[in-house]
Amino acid sequence: MIRASIVGASGYSGGELMRLLSAHPEVEIVAVTADQQRGRRVDESFPSLRAFSDLTMEAPDWEALARACDVVFLALPHGLSQEGAPRLLDAGVRVIDIAADFRLRDPALHQRWYGEHKSPALLAQSVYGLPELHADAIATARLVACPGCYPTASILAVVPALEWREPGAPIIVDAKSGVSGAGRGAGANTHFGEVNENVRPYNVGRHRHTAEMLQAFAAAGANEPVFFSPHLVPMTRGILATCYVRTAGAVEQAAAEETYRRRYEAWPFVRVLTDKLPETKATQGSNFCDIAVLAAPDQRLVVAIAALDNLVKGASGQAIQCMNLMFDLPQEEGLWAPPLYP
Amino acid sequence: MIRASIVGASGYSGGELMRLLSAHPEVEIVAVTADQQRGRRVDESFPSLRAFSDLTMEAPDWEALARACDVVFLALPHGLSQEGAPRLLDAGVRVIDIAADFRLRDPALHQRWYGEHKSPALLAQSVYGLPELHADAIATARLVACPGCYPTASILAVVPALEWREPGAPIIVDAKSGVSGAGRGAGANTHFGEVNENVRPYNVGRHRHTAEMLQAFAAAGANEPVFFSPHLVPMTRGILATCYVRTAGAVEQAAAEETYRRRYEAWPFVRVLTDKLPETKATQGSNFCDIAVLAAPDQRLVVAIAALDNLVKGASGQAIQCMNLMFDLPQEEGLWAPPLYP
Amino acid sequence: MIRASIVGASGYSGGELMRLLSAHPEVEIVAVTADQQRGRRVDESFPSLRAFSDLTMEAPDWEALARACDVVFLALPHGLSQEGAPRLLDAGVRVIDIAADFRLRDPALHQRWYGEHKSPALLAQSVYGLPELHADAIATARLVACPGCYPTASILAVVPALEWREPGAPIIVDAKSGVSGAGRGAGANTHFGEVNENVRPYNVGRHRHTAEMLQAFAAAGANEPVFFSPHLVPMTRGILATCYVRTAGAVEQAAAEETYRRRYEAWPFVRVLTDKLPETKATQGSNFCDIAVLAAPDQRLVVAIAALDNLVKGASGQAIQCMNLMFDLPQEEGLWAPPLYP
Amino acid sequence: MIRASIVGASGYSGGELMRLLSAHPEVEIVAVTADQQRGRRVDESFPSLRAFSDLTMEAPDWEALARACDVVFLALPHGLSQEGAPRLLDAGVRVIDIAADFRLRDPALHQRWYGEHKSPALLAQSVYGLPELHADAIATARLVACPGCYPTASILAVVPALEWREPGAPIIVDAKSGVSGAGRGAGANTHFGEVNENVRPYNVGRHRHTAEMLQAFAAAGANEPVFFSPHLVPMTRGILATCYVRTAGAVEQAAAEETYRRRYEAWPFVRVLTDKLPETKATQGSNFCDIAVLAAPDQRLVVAIAALDNLVKGASGQAIQCMNLMFDLPQEEGLWAPPLYP
């Protein structure tokens, strides 16, 4: 059994890790921490988990965690993983970070989007935890930085189309997200009265997740700019990203579909749809990312649409998929279940 | 023109007062206050009001308000109206309080449910602002305490049935409320992720609004206990109260309907339905309370169901209805418009 | 492996059976039928099931089903199970019906609420599929009639309180349901524009599920009338039933809790809560029924609140729990997973 | 008083016309028709309208309507206005059509997107009812074709940016709509269980409203292709259109804002926002269209975002705005009220 712990267990990503790991046959959760909720039982914070966990939230103690665990999941607010990760890694524990702390490999880039990094040396060792792109590196990584929810959808949707891109033309990502992506913290952005019956664009053209997309596209050789428009829609889970790639020449529908189908045929959690369009509900509660591609050759445009559950494939499920690879398990282990529909 | 101001304008009741008073032909809003948002334009806080108000939120200054206004609406968190109301009343300004501060006439009762009162002498002067029960007293009142949202629905539903009640049997009020009833403050109770796809009972058997119901029923001669079960449902506006009154004898459907019809036939904002049941959406954004009564004579039970918009008839609309009565205007003035459907 | 098929697979109960049985280690789905969707792949109807089933919906052929299956789940509109069930039973196949066709054991009662029964002789053999009440009978049954969603919540909530009831006083069940309980058929009751931002009572005092509650309470010796008030609330899944039982004497909180705790301590899918109230979201997607009891001894009232997912414990999950008992498996088999939260 | 009638009053656009015209000081509704609901009172179909209308739905009788009315609003399913409009126009009655029947002036274009037209000669007389573009023509029109909900938002957002466009580059419109845009008819696209907790793109790249956008942009001299991606989001009312225009040169933010501000400063129902982004809720129930523009000069991109209520500015409110112009009333008459928020 893999001994795992979750640091930052009181938020939505932490709760989702507990939900999924509770059903994972190869994992034992040995500790959960949440600074502000220490002393509370897990099922006080997540009533859904009653009967699944007798654990109590603890204050994080890096030394104790290092002794007790094979792997630690960090589900902390951005900026806090930088402190604990080095101590865990030094003790030989593997670390999977769900926050943004180790996603951008270039310290200058990190500085520009998130401010100064406290452990910049670690950035070079960290592996970007998108299995469909970096499975081999993940398998041997000590430190995995799980992609953001928006980048997961957008990168999986756009990367196969990059080969066709028109040089210099911006790649446009128009994404619609449920509210859980903003975390469990209460605020004007998450108040039901403000969110319900509303579509609200925010940080258009300047959201931090743009940096991850730029990094991923550049790694594939594409240095075009990205214009990213996130929108909050009145639902709890789910992201749908509609991505527009201007092409240098005319790309036909059949060729586009074939490219996408081949690109992902070995990857069980990416379902390429050819007879209908993705919708978030078809992925609810699961680790799937559904993708369709539409070509408009007369407009020199390829439109790729991806849907996923932001808390699963966009966060905790993907983290477990990475863990499976790191511990030489089938990537589907503990994750292979149909989405909840309706 | 009636010169009005709104104290506590940044919350939902305050915003609703601005929305409704903006369309009132006899009212001029001369000032709005909101301690924490002072200096912000009204339409920063309520983007819907852009083009309707150039006012800026001020810190509350009771002397200035007293000089500038004929009437002041207090839309503050419970407990704060007790400070300002005496100063406004002393200056001859009429006060309409949307909070709970002046609803319970008995200081001991207030103490038990809300803690010590700072101006207990005012309780005796205050008039409970339910026009369908107390229109005459409201017309001459200096201080009106608007009922809570749950009590408005429950009292209007239950009062006509009290004559049939079985002595001693508890009156059961099972109410379902939208989230705006919890105010604009962010918290676990209002977070979209916690509220959406959820029905959540809370404070069952011990919600403070029970006291208002007990007071209103006692005023009608009924001293039976009240068991009140509030439930939060995933919608923004609306309350539906399903009220169960055990009867001493068999009450037939036709007689029950006739009693309700007659009781409210002179009251334009209570619509007694006989061919269908109330639903909250049919009152959305309006000052209506829709009521139906169902008799189960073989069970000695009368069930009365009321629906209203908690921010309008349950708060700000009713406050304006009271203001109309206080200033000798038709009670419908500025309020007579169809609900928003769907 | 148990060979199972699903008749009526295109509706929500059918889809939920497919979702849950796909993850059941002891079951193989051998056929799915849906008259109007025959020839369509399962994942055309339920895009969530892509990668989990290659089956195609067939027209129902009772002989073929009888040959191929050990057990058949009937998820048909009410009235249609009466035709197929006898043919399957004659062929030695076990039948689990999710519709209302075999729930009421008394043909006269069935006639009164649902019209004439085509196989009245079968009513006496059928076992009411509520494991927490009838596990032994279910284990040996050939024909199981799964309870309705409202009765499951209401019966589990009320039965332990019946011993305290005041003779003759009506038992009041005030229930709030998500829309999926109305089925997948499109109509005014399920249109988003009519349901969203709405609480809508319907069939108050005359809903068919009242008959099941009466039958269950009578089986426990209680012949009191039941007043049942169903309400539609704007969510997809979930039922919360708030049940009011007038008591003959004063019942204290501690005694009430102890009674409920003991009644269900051997039943893994009923979670008795003593520190918080049930909410539907804590059961989402799972087979749990969460129950709390509140005593108001001064009002001679006991209030029991139950929450469940109407498509799982209220329909398909409970059907599988019954199947597990019928095939001598642990009742949790294939069902033991945490709810989806948020 | 303007004598008006509504043909097709049982749908959402028809109901919205009744709601708005009930509050219009210069209009009397003389008749409402709805073929399938004839004989039903208006408030049976729209319970919200109880106390506002005693009218009964009639079968449409074009001769009677022509005699009784000054103006007829057609709120029929697409294709049916073609039959009644000529008869009303011949009788000298003015016609405002909310359907698509008279929107495309070129019969060939109409044929391609909607099939053969029954009164192609009328297409040339019809005026496209977007007051902010065609006020003068509307004022003298006999037949006004109100724009679709998506085109209203998209055209108002894009037109001021067309001067900067890169020749040949597609204009991308990514729109998010509430469910009421699909009408009141029940179907899989409007079922709560399918829509809630879902974002669903549909008809991407081939929605009929593309034709209106192409026509409007061409009228402004822009013959670039349009790629239109509509998405259904889980809300009742509201459209948000995020529009991407590639520019020939670098357009700076200040210049873009100034262009938009000037373009609409004389138009009261377009609110150009410069300090925040539009959101649908800020327009709920009102005739406003809120617009913001964002320039990304380094990407040669201008992004314009528009929000409106699809049933008001996107349909019935705009129809009344047109009527006001046609009858020489201020365009705000009967429409000037703050949106409902929250």
Image (cartoon, coloured by chain):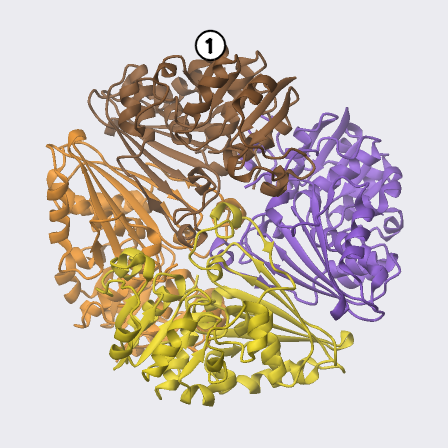
Chain colours: A yellow, B brown, C orange, D purple
A30, A61: nearer the viewer: A61
Answer few, some or many: residues within 10 Å of disc 1's Cα (few below 14, many 20 plus, some between 14 and 19): few
Residue B265 vs residue A159, the one in the foreground: A159
Question: Which residue does the image show at 83% across and 68% down from the upper left?
Answer: D249
Query: Residue B216, how many percent across, how many down?
Result: 34, 20
In this orientation, does residue A176 appear?
A: yes
Q: Which corner quadrant of the image does residue B229 belong to? A: top left
Helix, strand or loop at label 1? It is: helix
User: The C terminus of chain B lies in which quarter of the figure?
Assistant: top right
- Does the image show residue C103? no
Q: Quadrant of residue C318?
A: bottom left
Image quarter of the N terminus of chain B: top right
Number of marks in picture? 1
A59 vs B287, left or right, is: left
Q: Is residue B100 left or right of residue A238?
A: left
Q: Chain of mark 1?
A: B
Q: Is residue D134 left or right of residue C79?
A: right
Q: Residue at x 35, y 69 (%)?
A: A17
Counting from the top left corner in percent of width and height, residue D338 is at 64, 36
Q: Position of residue C154 (x, y in %)?
A: 25, 47
Residue B24: image x %, image y %? 63, 24
Indicate the quadrant where residue B127 lies: top left
Q: Amino acid at mark 1?
A: Asp
Classify residue A85 as left or right of residue A231.
left
Q: Which residue is mark 1?
A: B136
Residue lying at 56% horizontally and 17% vertically, measured from the top left: B324
